[in-house]
Amino acid sequence: MRAYGLKTRLGQRFDEEIRFFRGWIEKPRSVGSIVPTGAVMARRMASVVDTGSGLPVLELGPGTGCITRAILARGVDPTMLWSVEHSEDFVDHLREIHPGVNFVQGDAFALDAALAGAPPVYDCAISGLPLLNFPVEARIRFVNSVLERLPPGRPLVQFTYGPLSPVPTRKGDYSVEHFDFIMRNLPPAQLWIYRRGARA
């Protein structure tokens, strides 16, 4: 039985990698990597969620759902997770494997439109977007737009494959904090946290 479960998980992982690779071939700027986020990094990113806050969680760029799974495993009710994904193929796939989660097909760089009708405030935000593929000014606007939806001090966590924060310091109304370096990811990745106001 355990062997069957392992085979099922490996099959699912392979399916996700093929789907992710196909997405990268079709739209490399939007996907940003040829493989999905690893489980170790996803769990670390999800660790910022405060399950006792009573607020929903905002996920940006879920891709094939590795970070989504980690957020749900953290104890977040699916109906309390709002996830914005640009790819229609990914959204269709995510709705199949994670029923109950509020998946929105939209542009994370235009959250007013993407989240129209959604809750106005979130506990935290977890981003799997390939920010280095976008101009610096767009990254700064993105961070400020996300932080407007979080209580003071609550984090936006973002990964990058580069050595530095993908969003520069002293360019917007936010602080920047190095969160972790995940060696057990392909490729290894840095995690950064952005906040506005006092830490919670």
Image: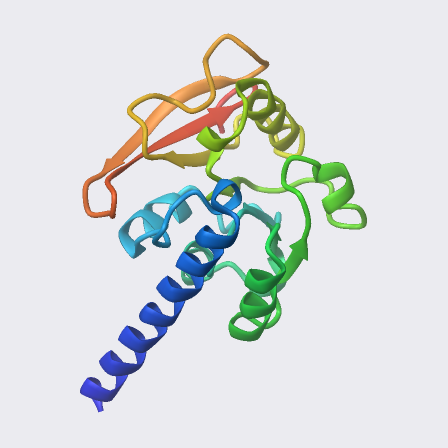
- In this view, the residue in front, 50 or 135, is 135
What count of labels does the image hold?
A: 0
Q: Locate residue 191, reporting x and y percent.
A: 35, 34
Extreme residue toward the front, this view:
25
Q: Does residue 130 sit above or below 171 in this rendering?
A: below
Extreme residue toward the right, this view:
117
Asked if residue 74 can be seen in this view, the reply is: no
Lateral position of residue 132 relative to residue 85, left or right: left
Residue found at x 24% / y 47%: 185
Q: Does residue 33 sit above or below 112 in this rendering?
A: below
Residue found at x 66% / y 43%: 107
Q: How is the image coloured?
A: rainbow
Q: Locate residue 108, reporting x and y percent.
A: 63, 40
Q: Locate residue 158, reporting x and y percent.
A: 44, 35
- In this view, the residue in front, 17 or 167, is 17
Extreme residue toward the bottom, this view:
1
Asked if residue 159 can be seen in this view, the reply is: yes
Residue found at x 22% / y 91%: 1
Lateral position of residue 137 relative to residue 158, left or right: right
Residue found at x 63% / y 23%: 141
